[in-house]
Amino acid sequence: MTVFLVRHGEVENPDRVVYADLPGFGLSDRGREEAAAAAGFLAPMSVTAIYASPLDRAQETASFISEACGAQVGTRDDLTEWLVARRWKGVTWEDLPTAFPGELEAYLDHPTDLPFAEESIPQLGNRVGAAVVELAAAHANERIAIVSHQDP
């Protein structure tokens, strides 16, 4: 059994918005090239199943892999990105220090200690780790791809 962990391709975000789980943030041209490259790498690997976060960018990346490998994409909410950014969604990265004083600095300086976070890093690891273990067990002796996000 082999599990390939894939981060989605680059996102189209010219306004530098914290998009978190907002809809409508698909891949940029470069992100589509990255997804195609990942699909090209995985195509000869005999991937039999693909699972992805429900967020647009992960689904779009997974669709490239699906087309190359001929495997269906299953959507899993537990593969979504770290929930810490939900409170910031819709705000530009440049405006975060004003909108949420001290939080961006805390995130960058000590991300393991964020009392304002909806989910801690250990909780994120447990959530995504449990999904990977479950999927690996369900696909023993197969090769699967899991498309998620940067922090997971």
Image (cartoon, grey):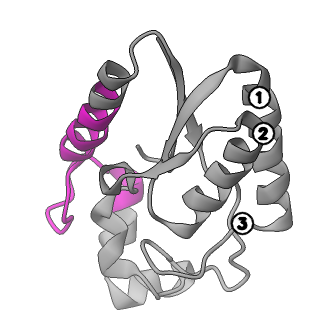
- Using residue 120 as the reference point, say whether residue 15 is left or right of it: right
In the structure shown, which secondary structural element does the residue marked by tag 3 occupy?
A: loop
In the structure shown, which secondary structural element does the residue marked by tag 2 occupy?
A: helix
Q: Which mark is residue 27?
A: 3
Name the residue nearer the viewer: 108 or 131.
131
Identify which residue is drawn at 58% across, 38% down.
6
Q: Give coordinates of residue 87: x percent, y percent.
A: 30, 79
Q: Give coordinates of residue 27: x percent, y percent.
A: 71, 66
Residue 57, quarter of the rendered image: bottom right
Residue identifier under label 1: 43
In the structure shown, which secondary structural element does the residue marked by tag 1 occupy?
A: helix
Mark closer to the observer (3, 1): 1
Marked residue nearer the N-terminal end (3 or 1)? 3
Residue identifier under label 2: 68
Q: What whole-number distance in Å separates the C-alpha atoms at marks 3 and 2?
A: 17 Å
- Using residue 104 as the reference point, say whether residue 31 is left or right of it: right
Q: What whole-number distance in Å separates the C-alpha atoms at marks 2 and 1?
A: 5 Å
Marked residue nearer the N-terminal end (3 or 2)? 3
